[in-house]
Amino acid sequence: MTQIYADANQFQELFTVMFDEIAAVDPDGMNELIEQRMVIRFLVREPEVELWIDGRSKPVITSFGPNDLDATLTGDLTGNSMHELLLGTLPLGRALMFRKLKVRGSKSKAMKLESLLHAMQASYPGLADEMLQD
């Protein structure tokens, strides 16, 4: 399978637009993340990207690159696996079971990712169609 994202810049651009859209269209979509005061770090490979989602306040703050935050959960996955998760073609439970998504931190909190994924899945497919053109 070829790499979905051309490079880290394309990944960051798409995810920035997606989180802006979530904040505008569904500002309560990440309430569970905020209620848990979770800080999630995704270490994405192919392309190499470090994505931070800081749910300690509303609105949720996203950033890219090294950070001094203390992550509640760290997820490690490829860009292609992230793409499949957000399209809904790779369910969260299957990603965890088959280690396509490796999580460090509380396993019970890892299942709280479901609400975050649902918020992201509402925006991602249309943006991916639009922004991942060859």
Image (cartoon, grey):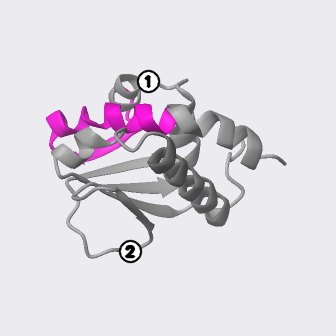
Q: Secondary structure at mark 1?
A: loop
Q: Nearer the viewer, residue 30 or 13?
A: 30
Residue 30: quadrant of the picture: top left
**To which quarter of the image does residue 97 belong?**
top left
Q: Amino acid at mark 1?
A: Pro
- With respect to residue 121, does 91 lie above or below? above
* Residue count near mark 2 (Cα–Cα under 10 Å), binned few <14, some 14–19, many ≥20: few
For label 1, count other residues whose C-alpha is less than 10 Å away and answer few (under 14), some (14-19) or many (20+): some
Q: Establish if 70 lies above or below 23.
A: below
Q: CA distance from mark 2 to mark 1?
A: 28 Å
**Residue nearer the viewer, 1 or 69:** 69
Q: Where is 96 relative to 128, above or below?
A: above
Q: Is residue 110 magenta?
A: yes
Please give the label number shown on residue 91.
1
Report the side of 130 relative to 19 (left or right). right
Task: Compare marks 2 and 1 and give the one earlier in the sequence.
Answer: 2
Question: Vertical placement of 66 versus 44: above or below?
Answer: below
Indicate the position of residue 96 as horizontal and vertical percent values: 34, 31
Residue 105 in sight: no
Viewport quadrant of the N terminus: top right
Q: Which mark is residue 66?
A: 2
Q: Position of residue 111 (x, y in %)?
A: 25, 32
Q: Amino acid at mark 2?
A: Pro
Q: Mark 2 touching mark 1, by CB under 8 A?
A: no
Residue 133 belongs to the span the image colors magenta: no
Q: Which mark is residue 50?
A: none
Label 2 residue SS: loop
| Residue range of the region highlighted in magenta in the rendering | 98-121
Residue at 67%, 36% (x, y): give it: 126
- Relative to residue 37, is residue 92 drawn left or right? right
Which residue is depicted at the point 38% across and 74% down?
A: 66
